[in-house]
Amino acid sequence: MILFLDIISFLFNFINTYFLFKILCRFLNIREQLIIRIISFLFCFPIVNIIIYANDITNILGVLIGFLIFAFVFYNDICIRKLSTVIIIYPMIVSVNYLAQDIGMHIFFMFIDASELNAKNVSTFKSTFIHTVSLVVAPVIWFSVWQMIKRMNVRSINLINTKMWLMIDGICLCVFTSILIILNFVPENPLINYPICFSGIATIFASLYMTIYISDSVQTAYQLQTIKMRHQYYEEKKQEEEKVRSIYHDMKNHLLVLENQSDMVETVKMSQKLRKEISDYENYIHTGCDILDIIIKDKSRKAKEKNIDFSATIDFYDVKFIESLDISTIFGNGIDNAIEATEKLPEEQRAVIIKAKIIHGFVMILIENTCNDRSKSKFKTSKEDKFLHGFGIRNMKKAVEKYNGECTSNCTDGKYNLKILIPINSEKRSATK
């Protein structure tokens, strides 16, 4: 019977470990290697099942440091995400495990009288049973946490910026500090400790909900912005097509005038006027992807306003597996950085070239611009991208890596080249993430 209870206890601890691992993978991108995943899962076991006593600050802080090292070593993500994940989750671990341990101890002394304890005649079965019962609460709480955050879109959490993470971290740090002080620097009193720990758990749940709400809100804002840009794009396209039809209608008369025009100066002026009238329509490039058409049109207009020679040759008709959000991140950031760098040059030197197509089983993307020296700006940006709501160049690289692709860049002979290669067979692998 004792063996059965021990198995049940281990099962509870295993459940805690499983849900912590799933939660971490929701917040962070674990490294791809299978051995790394196995070791990561095993490391979750002592972290989530740590025994917490009052006046045990060394153990609490020691495991916190270990948790931080674990997150930085086994997960491939930006530092603020790793730090924030630990700050959000660890107060929950401390609160849950302290309550389970302390409440279990009080239950133990409720059923074990002093004579048994003094005689050291405590039933092994009774103590094991009480210990097992005290472990029931933790799996229920971790299951509840998982149920809350599993609906959180992994892609939308990438949209949370540093300021938002710091706001969430501030709340969770206050919770953790309060728990740490109460457990270690205030005389132990269940009437004080328990409410603080329960409040801490409730606050962490609220913080997790706020994280989900923020990520969903940013995702919704991005989608609304995309819809707005689509609408604007098609309205402009409709107007330009009407303009071209009007020009076409009068083209015969214009040609007759040109044929009978003896003044070459007037002929050139009329020709230039015609070119200017139809030039806007030339900006419409059909890439085979609606969102990419919109992005290229928008960036082409911006380049024209800055007197930048903008050229785009893109064939995305057979590229169906890259999601719209990732296309926006890759092309939006890459082209904006190219425009930003090029506009610093004299007008006659400004040029941006975009090429993208499938070559030998890879999606090849080239973003090239003239420059003086951009060697220091590799995968960095100093601006705020309005279209992408502040997406950084780091997110651009992450979007490429999501499809097992690679980003490389170089600056030679006055040209900066950003090259992206994404394997076509990444479609199946990215769908499983």
Image (cartoon, rainbow, N blue to C red):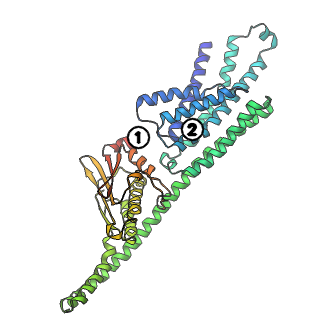
Q: Residue 367's quadrant in the figure?
A: bottom left
Residue 305 seen in this snapshot? yes
What quarter of the picture does the C terminus occupy?
Answer: top left
Query: 10 Å neighbourhood of mark 1: few (<14), some, or many (≥20)?
Result: few
Residue 246 in percent (x, y) is at 31, 83
Return the residue nearer the eye: 248 or 273.
Answer: 273
Amino acid bearing label 1: Thr
Query: 10 Å neighbourhood of mark 2: few (<14), some, or many (≥20)?
Result: some
Label 1: element kind: loop
Return the residue nearer the eye: 345 or 177.
Answer: 345
Q: Residue 6's quadrant in the figure?
A: top right
Residue in the image at 58% along x and 51% along y = 163
What quarter of the picture does the N terminus occupy?
Answer: top right
Amino acid bearing label 2: Trp
Left or right of residue 113: residue 427 = left
Tell which circle, 2 or 1, labels the residue nearer the N-terminal end: 2
Return the residue nearer the eye: 150 or 50.
Answer: 50
Residue 341 in percent (x, y) is at 40, 61
Residue 197 seen in this snapshot? no
Residue in the image at 46% along x and 63% along y = 227
**Distance CA(mark 2)–CA(mark 1):** 19 Å
Q: Which mark is residue 183?
A: none
Residue 17 in percent (x, y) is at 55, 29
Per the image, the residue denoted by label 1 is 432
- Work out whether 400 lies above or below 74: below
Residue 387 in percent (x, y) is at 46, 61
Q: Residue 146 carries which label?
A: 2
Left or right of residue 356: residue 220 = right
Residue in the image at 61% along x and 26% along y = 49
Label 2: element kind: helix
